[in-house]
Image (spheres, rainbow, N blue to C red):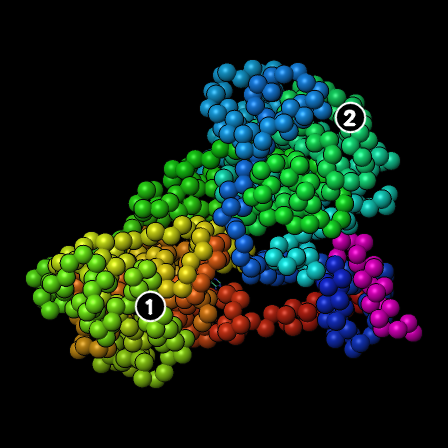
Amino acid sequence: MPPKNSRMADACRAMKRFGISEGQTKAAVKELLKVYANSWEFIIDENYRLLLDFVLEQKPEEEKGVRSKKKEAPSYDKTEVVELPTKRYCTRQQKKQALSPLEHSTSCLEKSPLKRARQSNEDNLISDSEESEDSQPLVRRSRRRHQEREVLDSGNNFDPLCNRNTQLEESLNLIGEDSSSDFDEDGLKLLEVESVNTDNKDNVFDLPHFVAASSTPKGDLEMSMICHSSPQSDFCPPHFDEALEMVEETHIKSCRVEECFVETGTDSIFDESTAQDVLASKYDHPSFQNELILSKNLIKVIPHIPKHIAFGCYDGLQCLIGFARKDIENIFGETAKRLKVIQGRRSSKLCKVEAAYNYHSSLGVIKSFFYIDDITRGEERVKVSLENGRNAEDLPIFFYIPNNLVYKNAYVKFSLARISHGGCCSHCFGDCLTSPIPCLCAAETGGQFAYTPGGFVTEKFLEECISLKREPKQDHYLYCRNCPLQRSKNKKSSVPCKGHLLQNFIKECWSKCWCNKKCGNRIVQQSITVKLQVFLTPEGKGWGLRTLEDLPAGAFVCEYVGEILTNTELHERNVGSPGNKNTCYQVLLDAGWGSKGVLKDEEVLCLDATVYGNVARFINHRCSDATLVEIPVEVETPDHHYYHIALFTTRKVDAMEELTWDYGIDFNDSDHDSGHPMKPFRCLCGSPFCRDRSDMKGDVRLLTYVRRRRRVQLQA
Ligand SMILES: C[S@@+](CC[C@H](N)C(=O)[O-])C[C@H]1O[C@@H](n2cnc3c(N)ncnc32)[C@H](O)[C@@H]1O
């Protein structure tokens, strides 16, 4: 019997042919050995068929793993990278010049990328009618095709990956495959291209095909296509029209193609002149020639690319993969300095198709596009963008409101008469935080301000709030004598209150105070100042919210805003909605419950952000170690039955990191009786402290799989 190591090495070699990494193979073999009592027989059988099937079945889960791993990437200058001008446009003037592709490319390259991008924006202002039909037949055609489709498809959801062919699926799988060695020290993923680029004639990946599609926050769509292009092979660059069609049909169904470029690169094994010869001869291929004549102004050939180039996109970041920095600077000039560059590990041949489209930012056409400039429709001081990455998903439909609004019966009466002089600072001037003696408003926080002069929650106060939430003790709960939650559920019998977490309140200065509007003790009422983005979470949690800038600990991010309902109204709303499916945007304002006598129904309040809400409705849950913590903030009224739920960072948060908070859900509450209005869901927070213990998926899935395999084998 061959030694164990050599069997593993053989298995890895066999799997490598299919683009499966060593890490994946080893993990799969380990699992299978467990099931087959350490026998290799089934694994080796039929040329590792079982192993291959098993790895391929595992893939979707592993892809999730890849993404969450990437999330933990250490910080680097992400903001700069996001701003990368990804389109390298040629000017309209250049398009009109009847240059050969190579001449044309030189003239394009002479301009700095920044200049080119600027020029292209100016070009975009030129109306369609100015465009000569002859100069851009393909673009024009695709526009018409799009317009026709727009009429047919209006209202259809964007589904970039539907209609894809098998080849595309295979190649996307390859790119998505995981291996811990695929990440450099910055946690960015290198595209695995060697496996699709072998000289093996039987290789299924011999034809050019798309490997990745990504959208950028600027609204560009990028497609990469790897081609087998060695001088010996009968490589032919993709038919331009075909490529364009594929881009449109498979990826940007509902977007308008404005401009489209094909860029080709060659391998470092060529010197510059050989590369030019090879490319020139390739473009002379009869099947391409006609298109070349028609679309030559759109084709740009970069004569010498020493290593493969590919654009990947992770959470809106662009990364340029495979170039040595020196080479990038030669080709892209100044722009290169703004890129995060990963040294290439292997050489490859790559053909890249770029398509740019315009998007609309008004809510009216939200459904057709997948990048929205500002979901708040100008309601906030800052824009909040939405990016629908590459997955197909309905865009959220709700009314954006920057402040809570009463639905009907909630008693939320703000009146100056209700605020006593003792409850506000009537002797202050300017910024209360600069005064040596904390003002009366700080009485709520033990005579110390909860905010620092820099505008963050103080370390001590933040710590207290976090530990109260993470490790609540029995005496941190208040119990109502006649709990409104139990009352609304079961009117007859009086079920004891399950308890409400006692929370530390902040009291902000307000209109009856003498301080300045910009006083440092008015943070939450200044509303959102942080740059935020709604995005589709890769783990399958739906939409999520992330910050586009680095945030220190204790920074105010946003308030949880929604309709203010009484508990009875909430109960009626939920009973009336099929399957209680709207509960996922509901929270209780119960921080003051149990501290006073029995609350009247109109004083028992909650927020529902299902239909009316702000950006906080997109914040997902994370058990225990969330990036945000909620703190009740008293602004307009001293009554603790109405307050603001303000969300502050629990620690330093990097740009592009997801913002999460612990909803306080009891995932093991099968009767859904804990009092939290939100129904428990299968938690995908990924926290090591995750409270959802229902997930024994790994073992169960493996067993099911093995049983199925055995059945198939027996039947055979
Ligand atoms: C307030 S919403 C958050 C935004 C939501 N993801 C969306 O797409 O609109 C709460 C819902 O998001 C989903 N969700 C939030 N956190 C989650 C988690 N850790 N795991 C799985 N789903 C989660 C659940 O469906 C939950 O009911």
State the residue position of label 2: 280
For the point 67% across and 33% down, the residue is 263
x and y, in percent, of residue 122 in the image: 48, 25
User: Looking at the image, is 626 positioned above or below residue 532?
Assistant: below
The answer to which of 568 and 503 lies nearer the viewer is: 503
Q: Check disc 2 and give the amino acid type.
A: Ala
**Picture quadrant of residue 227:** top right
The residue beneath circle 1 is 458
- Quadrant of the image containing the C terminus: bottom right
Mark linked to residue 46? none
Quick check: can you spot residue 602? no
Q: Position of residue 616 (x, y in %)?
A: 37, 56
| Residue 40 is one of the magenta-drawn residues | no
Seen as rendered, the residue at the extreme bottom is 474
Helix, strand or loop at label 1? It is: loop
Residue nearer the viewer, 274 or 367? 274
| Residue 3 located within the stretch drawn in magenta | yes
At a point 60% along the width and 20% down the height, the residue shown is: 94
What SS does tag 2 mark?
helix
Q: Earlier in the sequence, mark 1 or mark 2?
A: 2
Image height of 499 relative to 663, above or below: below
Circles 1 and 2: CB distance less than 8 Å?
Answer: no
Q: Which residues are magenta?
A: 1-20
* Quadrant location of the N terminus in the rendered image: bottom right
Residue lying at the far left of the rendered structure: 417
Answer with the quadrant where ligand 1 appears in the image. bottom left
Magenta stretch prevailing secondary structure: helix
Q: Position of residue 419 (x, y in %)?
A: 11, 64
Disc 1 residue crowd, few under 14, some 14–19, many 20+, Cα 10 Å: some
| Numbered-mark total | 2
